[in-house]
Image (cartoon, rainbow, N blue to C red):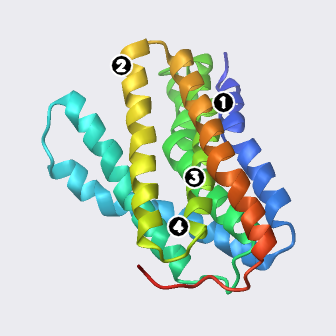
Amino acid sequence: MCAWGYAVPVAISLIPGCVALARTAGRSAGAWVAAALGGGGWLLALSARIPLLVVVRLPQGLYEYFASFAAGVFEETVRFFLLRAGFTGERSSRVVLSFGIGWGLAEALLVYSIPAALYGFTQTYSWVDLLPGALERNSAIVIHVSLTLLLSRGIGRLSLLAASVLLHSALNSAAVAALHTLRNVWLVELVIAVLSAVVFAVIAVPTLRYLRRTAEPRIGGSGE
């Protein structure tokens, strides 16, 4: 298979999210700003935790769970403060959704899509081997949207920050546990997809109804 075959998993990892963002943001400049800020927030959270991940020394099994918890702490804390900053002057469902999609797309691009494209030149893996990871990126975007919506229920509420940190860390840890227990990448991706769907149904759907019902004009609020 030529290097172009690697465009398939790259496309699967990015196109659904890009389409969702385009449909969500539409012609709203504020929504596109929110998406860009979401992507920047993910990069900031990654950069902030890298020094900690480098200096911590743990057995491989424990380190994976530590990294899962660190991702929850750093990503949700950054997401919390960016939302609290009132970056666009509104808290519409369009803006909040765009923020979450942008966050997930940045992760998909930098963690998966660019490395997968490079594999096309090195032939380290078959493009088929990369398909599970491509599907996982879409599940991750759904989770990031859900967690963004969770925090948007009460901007600045520390109880929601704690809940989002615990949920994010638990989902990451569940993925690690599934990988070690099932030892089948397709079953692991099925578990992740089911978890993302459940989280979306429980958190995102009712929150979207809440945002559309209240339609508050500004992001704001104070900590508990």
Q: Examine the image and state in which quarter residue 9 appears.
A: top right
Choose the circle earlier in sequence order: 2 or 4: 4
Residue corresponding to mark 1: 9
Q: Is residue 43 above or below residue 166?
A: below
Choose the circle earlier in sequence order: 3 or 4: 4
Mark 1 surroundings within 10 Å by alpha-carbon count, few (fewer than 14), some (14 through 19), many (20 or more) = many
Residue corresponding to mark 3: 144
Residue corresponding to mark 2: 180
Mark 3 surroundings within 10 Å by alpha-carbon count, few (fewer than 14), some (14 through 19), many (20 or more) = many
Residue visible at 47% across and 70% down in the picture: 80
Looking at the rendered structure, the kind of residue marked 3 is: His
Choose the circle earlier in sequence order: 3 or 1: 1
Give the Cα separation between the discs numbered 3 and 1. 20 Å
Residue visible at 87% across and 72% down in the picture: 27
Q: Nearer the viewer, residue 90 or 153?
A: 153
Residue visible at 60% across and 68% down in the picture: 153
**Nearest to viewer (mark 3 / mark 4):** 3
Choose the circle earlier in sequence order: 4 or 1: 1
